Structure formats: C-alpha cells, structure tokens
Amino acid sequence: MTQQRGRILVVDDEKNIRLTLGQTLEMAGYAVETAVNGEDALNQLQRNPFDLMLLDLRMPGMDGIQVLRQVMEQRPETQVVVITAHGSVDTAVEAMKIGAVDFIQKPFAPQEIRDLVAKVLDRDRQQTNYELYLTLARRNIGQRHYAAAKEQARRAIAKDSARPEAFNLLGAIHDLEGNRHTAMTNYRIALDIAPSYEPARYNMNLSGPVSSRSSKLDLG
C-alpha cells in the first residue's frame, strides 16, 4: 500500500477536472477529496483539515478569490494553489497577494500537477509548525488581515511558548491596531523569555502615534 503523503482538497466545478486531479494525485499517494463549488469547499474545510487546496478561480456562485479570502481567515495553515484559465496571470497574481502559494494554468499535464504539489508540500514540511505560523502571520500583517495574523501568532505560541518571536509578533499586531498597552505586555513577555531579543526591545522603545510607528515595527 502506498504511504499517504498528505490531504488535498480539489475545488473545481468541472467534473472531468475533479476526476482527473483526484486520480492523478491518489496514484501519487495523496488522500484526495473534491468539492464542486466554493460553498462545498468551505463546508469541508470546517469539518476537516487539509494540507493543500487546489482551487479553480473561475466558478459559478462564489468565485475562487472569495473562497481564498475565507480560507486565509478560517484555515490559514492550508496551502492554496490556484488553477487559472490560460492568459489569466493577473488574477493569479492577485490570488498570490491574498495568500495563495502558487498557481497553474489550464490545460496542464498530470506530471505537472504532481510536480507542483510535491514542491509545495515539501517546502511546507521544511518549516516547523512554529515557523510556518510565523510566516503566515507576517504574510497576513502585510495584507492588513490582523485578525488572521493574531490567530496565527497565538497558534505559534501554543506550539512553543518558550520562544520570543511569536510574542513580539503578537505585540506588533496589537501595536498596528492602536492597542499599545497590550502590545507592550507582549513585548515584555518576549523579553522575559529572551532578554537579548532585540526586536522586542526595539519595538518597546518606539514612540509617537501609531501612524509613525507602524512602518518601523520590527516583526522579527
């Protein structure tokens, strides 16, 4: 029996695409589920975690961009590769700014999708969960998705509360939201853990209104 390599959700309104991708990836050792539209995909994500989502951007009803935004809020640890029509590079770039990790254009060969999935999941596994959550938090800070960023920082803390980076990052998010008191609490925790951790010390010493501090914060 082939060892399971990861859980993948294929989201596409075209039945042939779902079948082709499902068979291709199952033969490569992945556990695959399919969703016929965006609402179906989000319902499945609420019930089960997936390592990777292959998401078609052009679907009736809720389109892929809408789905992607909700995935980044609800399941930010899920890696998303978007599937685009030929010539839709601008839409793929927009998706990657939101949080997609890569894209592939139709039509594609089975080997292309296997290679892309392996690359994305192998890259994911090279990071510890702690580091992955920090990466996701910083990405969402860049997009001003502060609620998602705070959740990711808290998940990092749950993984390892003896490291300062996530506390500093959580402090910076509160700083960006104008909550300096809570920010300072998190910076102090980071420094209690590691007195020589300079990003937290630097952020504590910043002064002035949030508008002037925001561009200077050290995210570690």
Image: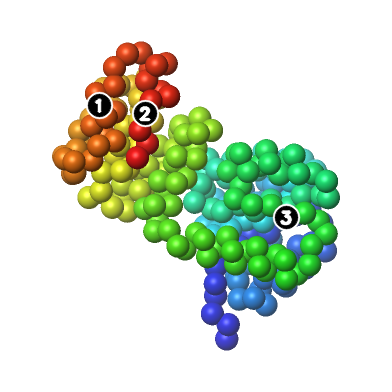
- As measured in the structure, the alpha-carbon distance from the residue carrying label 3 to the one carrying label 2 is 35 Å
The residue nearer to you, when weighing 115 against 151, is: 115
**Is 112 left or right of 117, judged from the image as shown?**
right
Element type at mark 2:
loop
Give the residue displayed 18% in from the left and 41% down from the top.
Answer: 196
Please state, as top left, top right, bottom left or bottom right, where the N terminus lies in the image: bottom right
Q: Secondary structure at mark 3?
A: strand
Task: Please name the residue that numbered disc 1 is placed on.
Answer: 204
Using the rendered image of the protein, determine whether residue 95 is visible from the camera's viewpoint: yes
For badge 1, the amino acid type reads Met
The amino acid beneath tag 2 is Leu
Position of 109 relative to 45 (above/below): below
Tag 1 secondary structure: helix
Disc 1 or 2, which lies upstream in sequence?
A: 1
Residue 74 in percent (x, y) is at: 52, 44
Q: CA distance from mark 1 to mark 2?
A: 9 Å
Question: Circle 2 sits on which residue?
Answer: 217
Q: Where is residue 207 shown, x and y percent of the image?
A: 29, 17
Dot 3 amino acid type: Ile
Q: Which mark is residue 24?
A: none
Q: Is residue 61 left or right of residue 133?
A: right
Instruction: Give the x, y percent position of residue 37.
Output: 73, 50
N-terminal of the pair, mark 3 or mark 2, is: 3
Q: Which residue is mark 3?
A: 104
Q: Is residue 50 above or below residue 74?
A: below
Res 145 seen here: no
Residue in view at x 58 percent, y 43 percent: 99
| In the depicted structure, whether residue 180 falls above or below residue 71 | above
Depth order, front residue of 35/29 = 29
Earlier in the chain: of badge 3 and badge 1, it is 3
**What x and y, as percent, mark residue 73?**
53, 40
Mark 3, residues whose alpha carbon is within 10 Å: few (<14), some, or many (≥20)? many
